[in-house]
Image (cartoon, rainbow, N blue to C red):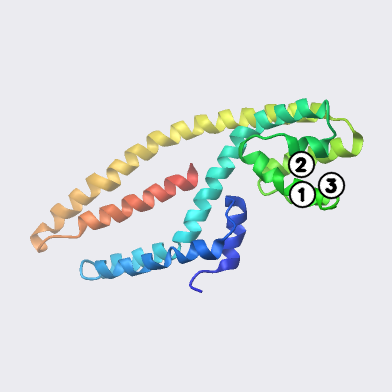
Amino acid sequence: MIYDLNSLNKIAVKAGIKDVERLSKKFIPTLFLPVFLININLLLAFLFLILLLRLPYLYLWYLSKQRHKKIRQQLPLFISSLKWMLSIHPIQKALCIVKFGEVSKIFKIFCVNYNKGEDFQKAIKKCAIFPELEELIKRLIVIYNTGSGEELLNLYADKVSSENLTRARKLSARMEIFAVAYTTVAAIIPAMYSGLTMNAGGSNAIYLGALASLLLVILWKVVE
């Protein structure tokens, strides 16, 4: 296999993808695309091939990142719903009743394993696939063991909400920097390079600009 399925599986768990092998096969035809760039620029074709080899990892990473983002946003409301259910149901049942976005989908793993007879702590720790969920699960275990501790959930929901607000403000500031950088890479630099090399019979500035723009977009998704 061209791709390392073990590595892909580790990312796929966070992305919520089950059939990794089937997914990876869909990317194999893309590896022939650099052939069309060989006559234009050999270096560009080689760099494009390297990027395509990492495409399944980037795709799963992107899905994982987007899912993580949704979970951070949904967590405060999920906790609020869970607290209400805890007033009428034990925690192991409340977790399976609450239905709220991606967070509930992850806790479905707990419900399946717990209903099969698995220990509460062992079953719920399998849901700790993101740091925020890991912190929540620590508090849920305290509630399970003591029968109380809803205040821990209140404090944690407030903490996550505050972190989400801070993150949104930082993202807004980064967006302005990215807009300037993208304009420079996509338009200004290729135009300058093209002018400098025109006397030598033209250039591949437009292709280099396109590749640089693509890499910049990927970089933005990394820091987003």
- Residue 75 located left or right of residue 194: right
**Where in the figure is residue 142, as x and y percent of width and height?**
85, 38
Q: Residue at x 31, y 56 (%)?
A: 211
| Residue 137, label in figure | 2
Say which element carries label 3: helix
Q: Mark 3 = which residue?
A: 120
Kindly identify the residue that appears in the image at 39 percent across and 37 percent down.
Answer: 177
- Quarter of the figure with residue 8: bottom right
Q: Residue at x 34, y 37 (%)?
A: 179
Residue 153 is left or right of residue 22, and the answer is right
Camera-near label (3 vs 1) is: 3
* C-alpha distance separating marks 2 and 1: 7 Å
Q: Label 2 amino acid? A: Ile
Secondary structure beneath label 1: helix
Query: What x and y, as percent, mark residue 9?
Result: 60, 61
Of residue 138 and residue 87, the one placed in the foreground of this image is 87
| Residue contact between numbered discs 2 and 1, judged by CB atoms under 8 Å | yes
Mark 2 or mark 1: which comes first in sequence? 1
Q: CA distance from mark 3 to mark 1?
A: 8 Å
| Residue designated by label 1 | 125
**Could you give the CA–CA distance between mark 2 and mark 3, rounded to whole angstroms?**
11 Å
Q: Please name the amino acid that badge 1 sits on.
A: Lys
